[in-house]
Image (spheres, rainbow, N blue to C red):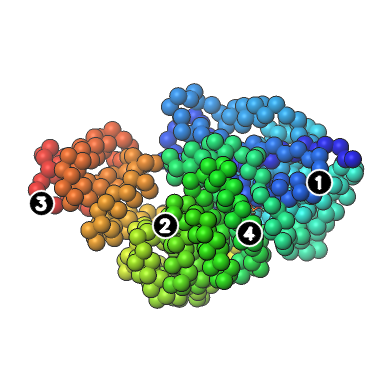
C-alpha cells in the first residue's frame, strides 16, 4: 500500500502576462482571454489513475478563471496579477506534494514564472514540475530564469510522470533517482547532459497505445463553465484529441518536438466512447477536435464517420475542427465524410500562396491548385470555409508575400486568418530567425509568440511594415473585399462580422461599416442606419475606433458623408 500523493495541476492562461495585468486592472486589451481544456494534463491524470492507486489530482484552471473574470469584468474591482493568482491558490484550500504546470504556449511562460514564485512561497516543501511544448524546448531558459522549478518534463509525460510518482512514493528525497527518469530534467542533469548532447536532450518515453489513457480526467475541470462559454463567446465547448504526431516538416510548427513524426491514434471505439460521454453524460453541444492532422488515416476515419452517423451524432453539427485541415490529406471523399459527420465549418491550412515559399522556405509543400479545387468542392456543401495564411518568413521577399495576397483574392472563402511568422521554440523557424540574428534566443520576449504581431525586423521586412501588411491584408480581405459581400451572400457576411468581430470588438469600424452595407443590401434600412449612427458616435468617443477610422476612412465614403451631412446617401 503506497501513501497518498497529492498532485496539483495548473493550467496557466495563454494570454501574455502584460495583457493579463491590464485586464485585471480593467484596462482594455482588445481581445478575449482564450481558454480550452488542458488535454495534456487531463490525459496524464487519467493514465496515472489507471496505473497507480492513491494519487489524488486537483486542477487550478487559471486560463478558465481569467476568461470567467473577463466575462463579468464590469462588476469586478481592479486586482493585481499576484492578487488574482493568490486568491485562486487560497481558494483551493489544499497542500499538494507535487505541483505540475503545463507551459504549452510560449505566451504562458512569463505568467507561469509568476505562478511558480507564488506557489513556492505558499508551499515551500512541494516539488514543482513543468511540462508542455514550450517547456520541452526551453530547458536552458527555464533553469537560467528560476531556481524554483525542480523538474522539467520533456515530451509526452504519461509514462514519465507515472514513473516519477512511483519513485516519489518509494523515496521522495532521492532527487537523483527522480531526475534519472528518461526525459525528466533537474538543473544538474540538464547541465551535465547539455555539455554532452547540446540541444539534443532526451524526451520522455512516448506512449504508443493511446487507448491506455482511457477517458481523459474531465472530472478535474469545472465543466459547468466549459458548457456555458468558450473562445467563441456564448457557445460552450469541450476539446478532444484523437491522435498525436505528424510526419510533415513545416518550418513554422513545433508540434513534432513533443509528439514526434509518427501518427498514433486512439481507436475509433475509444473516440466514440469519449464523444458519447461528453455529449450524453456531460451535455456538451459542441466538441472541438484539436487534432493536428485530422483524417490522415483515411480508412480509419471513414469507419469513424460511419460509427458517428450510426449513433446519430452527425445531425446536430456537434464537431468543430479549428486547427486547419491539411490539403495533402483532403480528397472529395474525405470532405464528404467530414461534412456528413457533422462539423460546423471547414478550415483549411494553406499558409502561403507562393509555390516558391511553400517548397523552398516553409517546406509545407501545399499544392496550391489542389487547395483551390478543395475549396471549390467544399463550397458545394452549405458550410462556411476559413483559411490560414502566414507572412514574413525569413527569405520571403515582399514580392513573395504579395503572391500570397494575390492568391487569397482568388479563393472563395468566408474568412481568412492572416498571421506573422513567429519563432516558436522547437520549430525550424526559431533556429532560422536566431541564425540570421533577428532574435536572441537567450533574451527574447516570449509574450511575443502570438501570431498577429512580432517585435523584430528581418532584412526583407521591418516589424512595423509586417504588422501593417498583416493588418491591412486582414482588413481588406475580410471587410472591404469580403468574398461573401462580393458574391451577394449578405446574411452569411453579417454572421461573420458579428461572431468573428463585433461580439468581441464592438468598436471595430470596418466590421460595423461592412455590416451596414450588408444590411442596406438586404433592405434592412433601420439596422443599416443604426450601424452608421453607432460608427459616427464611436469615432468621436472611442480611441480604437478613431485609429481605425483614421487609417481606413477612404474605404468608407458613405460614413464620411453621413458624418458630414447627418444623412444616408442613396448611392450605395
Ligand atoms: C489545441 C491547441 C490550441 C487551442 C487551445 C489549447 C489549450 N488547451 O489552450 C487553441 C485553438 C485555442 C490554440 C490557440 C493557440 N495556439 Co495552439 N495548439 C493546440 C494544439 C493543436 C494541441 C494542444 C494539445 O492539447 N495537445 C495534446 C496534448 C496531449 O499534448 P500536450 O499539451 O503537449 O501535453 C503533453 C506534453 O506536452 C506533456 N505535458 C503537457 N503539460 C504538462 C504538464 C506537466 C506538469 C507535465 C509533467 C507534462 C506536461 O505531457 C502531455 C501528455 O503527453 C497544439 C499542437 C499540439 N499538437 O500540441 C497547438 C500549439 C500548442 N499552439 C500553438 C500556438 C502558437 C497557438 C497560438 C499562440 C496561436 C495564435 N493564434 O497566436 C494560440 C494561443 C492562444 C492565445 N490566445 O494566445 C503552438 C505553441 C507553440 C509555442 N511555443 O507557443 C502549438 C504547439 C502548435 C504549433 N504551431 O507549433 N491552440
Ligand atoms: S503545421 Fe500541421 S502539417 Fe505541418 S508539421 Fe505542424 S502539424 Fe504537421
Q: Residue at x 43, y 27 (%)?
A: 74
Residue identifier under label 1: 52
Assess disc 2: are there few (<14), some (14-19) or many (≥20) residues with their C-alpha within 10 Å of its C-alpha.
many
Contact flag, marks 2 and 1 (Cβ < 8 Å): no
Observer-nearest of 84 and 157: 157
Q: CA distance from mark 1 to mark 3?
A: 73 Å
Count of numbered circles on the image: 4
Tell me the number on the disc at residue 345. Answer: 2
Q: Residue at x 18, y 44 (%)?
A: 524
| Rendering coords of residue 18 (x, y %) | 53, 39
Assess disc 4: are there few (<14), some (14-19) or many (≥20) residues with their C-alpha within 10 Å of its C-alpha.
few
Residue identifier under label 3: 571
Comparing labels 2 and 4, the label whose residue is closer to the camera: 4
Q: Residue at x 73, y 53 (%)?
A: 158
| Rendering coords of residue 485 (x, y %) | 25, 57
For marks 1 and 3 on the same chain, the one whose residue lies earlier in the sequence:
1
Q: Residue 410's image quarter?
A: bottom left
Q: Residue at x 56, y 42 (%)?
A: 282
Which quadrant: the N terminus? Answer: top right
Residue identifier under label 4: 269
Residue 433 appears in the rendering: no
Amino acid at each position: 500500500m503506497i501513501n497518498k500523493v497529492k498532485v496539483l495541476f495548473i493550467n496557466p492562461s495563454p494570454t501574455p502576462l502584460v495583457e493579463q495585468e491590464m485586464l485585471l486592472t480593467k484596462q482594455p486589451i482588445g481581445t478575449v482571454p482564450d481558454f480550452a481544456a488542458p488535454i495534456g494534463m487531463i490525459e496524464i491524470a487519467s493514465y496515472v489513475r489507471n496505473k497507480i492507486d492513491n494519487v489524488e489530482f486537483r486542477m487550478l484552471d487559471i486560463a478558465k478563471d481569467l476568461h470567467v473574470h473577463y466575462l463579468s469584468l464590469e462588476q469586478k474591482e481592479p486586482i493585481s496579477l499576484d492578487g488574482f493568482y493568490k486568491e485562486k491558490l487560497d481558494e483551493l484550500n489544499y497542500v499538494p506534494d507535487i505541483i505540475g504546470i503545463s507551459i504549452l504556449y510560449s505566451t504562458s511562460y512569463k505568467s507561469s514564472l509568476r505562478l511558480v514564485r507564488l506557489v513556492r512561497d505558499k508551499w515551500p516543501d512541494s516539488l514543482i514540475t513543468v511540462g508542455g511544448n514550450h517547456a520541452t524546448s526551453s530547458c536552458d531558459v527555464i533553469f537560467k530564469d528560476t531556481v524554483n522549478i525542480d523538474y522539467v518534463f520533456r515530451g509526452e509525460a504519461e509514462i514519465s510522470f507515472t514513473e516519477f510518482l512511483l519513485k516519489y512514493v518509494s523515496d521522495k528525497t532521492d532527487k537523483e533517482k527522480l531526475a534519472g527518469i528518461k526525459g525528466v530534467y533537474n538543473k544538474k542533469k540538464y547541465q551535465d547532459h547539455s555539455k554532452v548532447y547540446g540541444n539534443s536532450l532526451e524526451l520522455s518515453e512516448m506512449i504508443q497505445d493511446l487507448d491506455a489513457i482511457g477517458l481523459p480526467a474531465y472530472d478535474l475541470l469545472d465543466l459547468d463553465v466549459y458548457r456555458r462559454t468558450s473562445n467563441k463567446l456564448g457557445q460552450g465547448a469541450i476539446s478532444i484529441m484523437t491522435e498525436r504526431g505528424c510526419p510533415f516538416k513545416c518550418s513554422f510548427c513545433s508540434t513534432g518536438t513533443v509528439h514526434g513524426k509518427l501518427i498514433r491514434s486512439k481507436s475509433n471505439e475509444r473516440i466514440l466512447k469519449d464523444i458519447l460521454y461528453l455529449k450524453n453524460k456531460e451535455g456538451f453541444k459542441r466538441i472541438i477536435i484539436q487534432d493536428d492532422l485530422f483524417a490522415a488515416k483515411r480508412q480509419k476515419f471513414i469507419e469513424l464517420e460511419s460509427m458517428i452517423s450510426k449513433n446519430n451524432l452527425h445531425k446536430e453539427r456537434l464537431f468543430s475542427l479549428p486547427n486547419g485541415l491539411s490539403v495533402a490529406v483532403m480528397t472529395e471523399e474525405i470532405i464528404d465524410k467530414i461534412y456528413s459527420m457533422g462539423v460546423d465549418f471547414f478550415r483549411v491550412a494553406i499558409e502561403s500562396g507562393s509555390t516558391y515559399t511553400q517548397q523552398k522556405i516553409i517546406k509545407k509543400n501545399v499544392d496550391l491548385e489542389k487547395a483551390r479545387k478543395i475549396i471549390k468542392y467544399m463550397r458545394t456543401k452549405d458550410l462556411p470555409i476559413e483559411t490560414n495564411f502566414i507572412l514574413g518568413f525569413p527569405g520571403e521577399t515582399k514580392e513573395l508575400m504579395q503572391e500570397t495576397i494575390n492568391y487569397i483574392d482568388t479563393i472563395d472563402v468566408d474568412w481568412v486568418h492572416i498571421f506573422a511568422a513567429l519563432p516558436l521554440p522547437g520549430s525550424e523557424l526559431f533556429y532560422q530567425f536566431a541564425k540570421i540574428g533577428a532574435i536572441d534566443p537567450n533574451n527574447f520576449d516570449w509574450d511575443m509568440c502570438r501570431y498577429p504581431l512580432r517585435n523584430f525586423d528581418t532584412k526583407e521586412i521591418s516589424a512595423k511594415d509586417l504588422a501593417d501588411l498583416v493588418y491591412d491584408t486582414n482588413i481588406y480581405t475580410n471587410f472591404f473585399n469580403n468574398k461573401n459581400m462580393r458574391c451577394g451572400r449578405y446574411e452569411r457576411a453579417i454572421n461573420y462580422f458579428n461572431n468573428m468581430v463585433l461580439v468581441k470588438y464592438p468598436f471595430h469600424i470596418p466590421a460595423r461599416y461592412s455590416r451596414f452595407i450588408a444590411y442596406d443590401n438586404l433592405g434592412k434600412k433601420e439596422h443599416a442606419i443604426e450601424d452608421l449612427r453607432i460608427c459616427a458616435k464611436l469615432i468621436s468617443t472611442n480611441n480604437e475606433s478613431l485609429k481605425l477610422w483614421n487609417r481606413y476612412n477612404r474605404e468608407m465614403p458613405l460614413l464620411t458623408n453621413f458624418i458630414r451631412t447627418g444623412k444616408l446617401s442613396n448611392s450605395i
